[in-house]
Amino acid sequence: MAETTCQKCGMPEDLCVCDDIARDEQKITVKIDTRTFNKEMTVIEGLSEDVDIDTLSSTLKSKLACGGTAKNGQIQLQGNHIRRIKEVLSDEGFDRNQIEVKN
Ligand SMILES: [Zn+2]
């Protein structure tokens, strides 16, 4: 019986958690923040460091036709874009399974 081992950590597949860790690290969360001026903001967090958030925020702003800012690894978009954000992010190459939308 051939046992399959993980190529990253060398552990047998059933003990390996590499995939779980990678998935957790890349979890993108989208939430609505209403704290600022009682207006709804769509906040995108958890983007990995190799994402150029300035470019991504420009793309999102033009696709969703809204204003917004990118800072400290976080993108804030004016308005509530919860319904479209997954679609737009997946168009940009993000995995839908890594995007968690919170209400
Ligand atoms: Zn592993």
Image (cartoon, rainbow, N blue to C red):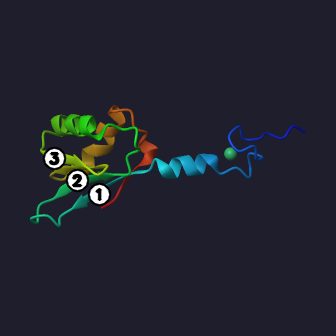
Mark 2 Cα shell of 10 Å, populated few (<14), some (14-19), many (≥20): many
Residue ID for mark 1: 31
SS state under label 2: strand
Instruction: Residue 54: name its quadrant.
Output: top left
Q: CA distance from mark 2 to mark 1?
A: 6 Å
Q: Quadrant of the N terminus?
A: top right
Residue farthest along the left direction in this orientation: 37
Q: Quadrant of the C terminus?
A: bottom left
For the point 44% across and 46% down, the residue is: 98
The label shown at residue 42 is 2
For the point 38% across and 51% down, the residue is: 46
> Residue flagged by tag 3: what amino acid is it?
Gly
Quarter of the picture for ligand 1? Answer: top right
Mark 1 Cα shell of 10 Å, populated few (<14), some (14-19), many (≥20): some
Labels 2 and 1: the sequence-earlier one:
1
Q: CA distance from mark 1 to mark 3?
A: 14 Å
Q: Mark 2 touching mark 3, by CB under 8 A?
A: no
Residue ID for mark 3: 68
Labels 2 and 3: the sequence-earlier one:
2
Labels 1 and 3: the sequence-earlier one:
1
What is the x, y in percent for residue 68?
A: 16, 47
Q: Mark 2 touching mark 1, by CB under 8 A?
A: yes
Horizontally, residue 40 falls left or right of residue 7, namely left
Q: CA distance from mark 2 to mark 3?
A: 9 Å
